[in-house]
Image (cartoon, grey):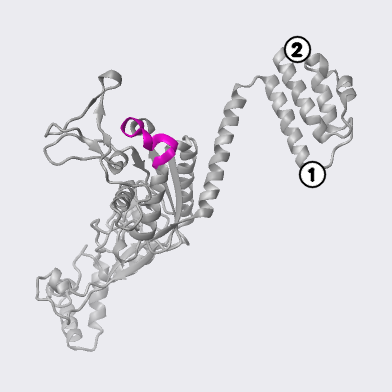
Amino acid sequence: MAIAAVPAYLGKNFREASPGMRFGFLLPIWTTRSDQENEVNKRAEAKSREGDEVRQLRREGMDVAIRELCRRQRNPLPGLWDKNDFAARNAWKEITALTPADKMQMEALSARQLALSSMMPTDRILVLPAQSTAPFTTGLGNEHPLENGFAFLNPYGLPYLPGSGIKGVLRQAARQLADSEWGETRGWTADKRYPLTVQQGQQRRPVLDAGNNPVMLSVLDVLFGYETDAGETTHVRGALSFWDVIPQIKGNNLTVDIMTPHQGHYYQKGETPHESGQPIPVSYLTIPPGSGFSFHVVCDLAHLTRLAPELAANQTWKTLLQHAFTHAFQWLGFGAKTAVGYGAMHLDQQAQDKREREIRENRARAERTALEASLTENQKTIRAFIDKCEKRQAELNGRKDKQNTGIHQEASKLVKGATGWSPEEKQALAQAIRQWLPQVIEKVEKDTFRKMGISALEQP
């Protein structure tokens, strides 16, 4: 049985390890002595000329048989610690499985990004949830024993789409829109309309290039960055930064796709191209369609305002970027193999509405927590009374309680116990009682407040 190239004390069962670890460090595809012996015995059982030869070699000893079969040009026996092709084909089953811990970690990382984004001002961040409509793959160019690599985020070992790749796709989408290649510019333009300057106020002056001309920036330069030709030093950092995306994978497995290069003899061996080649299928990892992708883009507003104030005003940068995302979803795709349809996505409007609602709730919760932390004990008591009134009003659903019950009795106790409160606290309590008591108690009139002694609380 083929094993992973790891110390023996780690064991052989790595099913609970992350997909990235199982695809890389813990990949069980390396030939052992027992694999070689099993293969020798299997070949010796064949009723053929090769079987006769292997049986003869085996009579001279297993070491001799293994050594001679490894030297053969045709169908050689895998050497010790060589890649075992049979094990490599079976390894895909172990690599693609996702454990409950993997799914929980994906959700936790996504929730962490949501929590971080909800704490930022809305004019500084753009959050766009999307859903893949085709398989997604990335990192195929990474070196790997199974021919094609894959991008896993360390130390979690989960598939991810790097922020640098997102930036590249969005820049290409913006460039296509700016060049009117698709009919509509959606506000993008390639015109160099923003002068690059240094210093502030009266000392502000334009930056000059090697030809002593003012350096002008386009919308793309401002948002994505500006890099000059070799030998020049006038580079500008873009105002946007892109977070990595942790896909929320649909189902409990990654998937395996296969490509079949038909001209391998030409590309790899330099032979004359012809139609009688023998293509060898190559497998690679993908993320199935229907998986969720949440894109986060952060804008450095101070930097953007210095370079192009009109893009910072009214969140113009966000509108432009949404158009670029829409174009990228429809026509470009993300990740690898986009030319054959991989990486296509669409905006998940339902998820976007849910995220915006969660962001508002998280922000409101944070503001409320900060407010409560600044309240005095008496102010917290008033806040608790208001919360109780709100809850009771929802329970009554249009009805009202009778006088001298529940909320009414509690309000009376608060009025009697507020003698040592500050004038501001007394007035706040009186205001809360006057506002909420008529909403939950029936037949509340001026005489009701007089009997409670609220007027004494309202004295300056």
The verdict on residue 46 being magenta is no
Residue at the image position 45 percent from the left and 45 percent from the top = 127
**Dot 2 corresponds to which residue?**
420
Give the alpha-carbon distance from disc 2 to disc 1, as whole Å: 36 Å
Q: Secondary structure at mark 2?
A: loop
Tell me the chief SS of the magenta region: helix
Q: Amino acid at mark 1?
A: Asn
Q: Disc 1 marks which residue?
A: 397
Instruction: Give amino acid for label 2.
Output: Gly
Compare residues 334 and 201 and report the one nearer the observer.
201
Q: Residue at x 81, y 42 (%)?
A: 396
Quadrant housing the C terminus: top right
Q: Nearer the viewer, residue 188 or 364?
A: 188
Report whether 341 appears left or right of 450.
left
Q: Residues within 10 Å of mark 2 (few under 14, many from 20)?
A: few
Say which label, 2 or 1, has the lower sequence index. 1
